[in-house]
Amino acid sequence: MLVEVKTTPFDANGALSRFTLSRPHAGACVSFLGTCRADSANGAVLGLELQHYPGFTEQEIGREAKAILSRFDLLDLLIIHRVGRVAPGDAIVLAAALSAHRAAAFTAVEVLMDYLKTDAPFWKQELREDGWHWIEPTKEDVARSARHKGDLS
Amino acid sequence: MVRVLFFGRLREAAGRSELEITPTGATIADLICQIERQEPALGEALRSPSVKVALDQQFVRPDGQISGAKEVAFMPPLSGG
């Protein structure tokens, strides 16, 4: 299991390729790459600034990833998340799961991403034409995450 | 002495990322009152029900005891991805 928080741009394709090749017994690799959009419902987005809590953020994601790894029938999980200034088009998050068959990996990546959106210790600001704006989880994000928590209880 | 950390919009409200303080009370609520006496707006922001608190890098209930913690972190709603 690899959990990394990066302060500089990362090579998502290279990381995914290394991850996939590391487990020859896996028959399925499902990945999600989240990137910085150039626009939002509020207009043009010039960039994002992400903060984390060094040590704690990695620890909390690791704890959740470990729970997901054992809950679903997975061989491994990969999470790489950017912090600092991110430009439109840049990768923000790469989440990937390896399993023997695809169903477990699909579900695991969805659950992991919904956790990262609402419960992982990150804070982000969006730079628009009129300045910086804090971004908090949407109602949809919270509802999605709550649904998984219900599934897991 | 406790190191108090602020993240996200709370860092903006505090005007800095951290401060050091010697707690005069036993609980997180006492600590917030102590900060509020110096900085009323920051104290009010820390009281928001949406703020999560960690003591020495463990999530705790906002009504918990400080009991010898070295680091207290105040965290507004989390948002990654």
Image (cartoon, coloured by chain):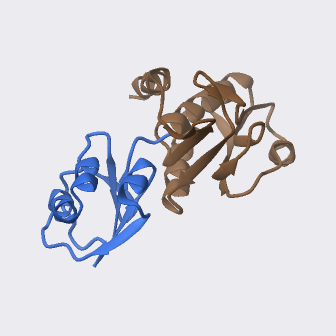
Residue drawn at x 32%, y 45% as measured from the top left: B51
Q: Is residue A15 above or below residue B20?
A: above
The answer to whether residue B70 shows anywhere in this view is no
Q: Is A77 placed left or right of B72 in the picture?
A: right
Q: Is B42 placed left or right of B80 in the picture?
A: left
Residue drawn at x 70%, y 36% as measured from the top left: A36
Q: Is residue A19 above or below residue B31?
A: above
Q: Residue furthest front?
A: A130
Residue drawn at x 21%, y 59% as measured from the top left: B32
Q: Quadrant of residue A32?
A: top right
Q: Is residue B4 above or below residue A71?
A: below
Query: Looking at the image, how many numbered discs can be counted on the residues?
Result: 0
Q: Is residue B20 above or below residue A36?
A: below
The answer to whether residue B14 shows anywhere in this view is yes
Q: Quadrant of residue A37?
A: top right
Q: Is B11 placed left or right of A94 in the picture?
A: left
Residue A73, image x, y percentages? 63, 33
Residue drawn at x 20%, y 66% as measured from the top left: B38
Residue A16, image x, y percentages? 81, 43
Q: Which colour represents chain A?
A: brown
Relative depth, front residue between A139 and B19: B19
Q: Which colour represents chain B?
A: blue
Assign the C terminus of chain A to one quadrant of the image. Answer: top left
Residue A112, image x, y percentages? 58, 35
